Image (tube, rainbow, N blue to C red):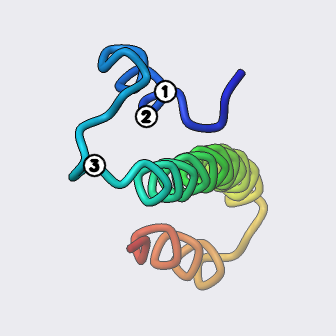
Amino acid sequence: MSETPLTDILLITWGMKPPQNVMIDHSKSIEREMNRFIEMFRKLNLHALDLTDRIRRLEQAGDAMEVYCDAIAAHNWNKAKEAKP
């Protein structure tokens, strides 16, 4: 598969003869950069989902341990849970 499928589609549409004012090399460069950003965003999004799942599991563990804590520790735990950004 090509690194620049969008630009390649335009070239095919133009019959491989783009108008003179079209900068194909620049277009391909921008498309490659866009594809890199999309891939980075996908990885960040997966990482954020993993972190969200980990936070959920930690909260469940903290809730389960709360019954074994004294009143001050339980209060501090609940304050910490509420302090989420």
Residue 63 visible to an observer of this rendering: no
Badge 2 vs badge 1, beta-carbon distance below 8 Å: yes
Q: Is disc 3 surrounded by few (<14), some (14 to 19) or many (20+) residues within 10 Å?
A: few
The mark nearer the N terminus, 1 or 3, is 1
1 with respect to 17 (left or right)? right
* Spot occupied by residue 21 in the image (x, y as percentages of width and height): 21, 52
23 with respect to 60 (left or right)? left
Gap between marks 2 and 3 measured at Cα: 11 Å
**Location of residue 26 by image quarter:** bottom left
**Location of residue 6 by image quarter:** top left
Q: Which residue is mark 3?
A: 22
**As displayed, is residue 77 above or below residue 7?**
below
* Spot occupied by residue 75 in the image (x, y as percentages of width and height): 51, 77
**As displayed, is residue 73 above or below residue 78?**
below
Residue at the image position 62 percent from the left and 47 percent from the top = 39
Q: Amino acid at mark 3?
A: Val
What kind of element bears circle 1?
helix
Q: Amino acid at mark 1?
A: Asp
Say the numbered circle drawn on residue 8.
1
Q: Which residue is mark 2?
A: 7
The mark nearer the N terminus, 2 or 3, is 2
Residue at the image position 71 percent from the left and 46 percent from the top = 57
Gap between marks 2 and 1 measured at Cα: 4 Å
Say the numbered circle drawn on residue 56.
none
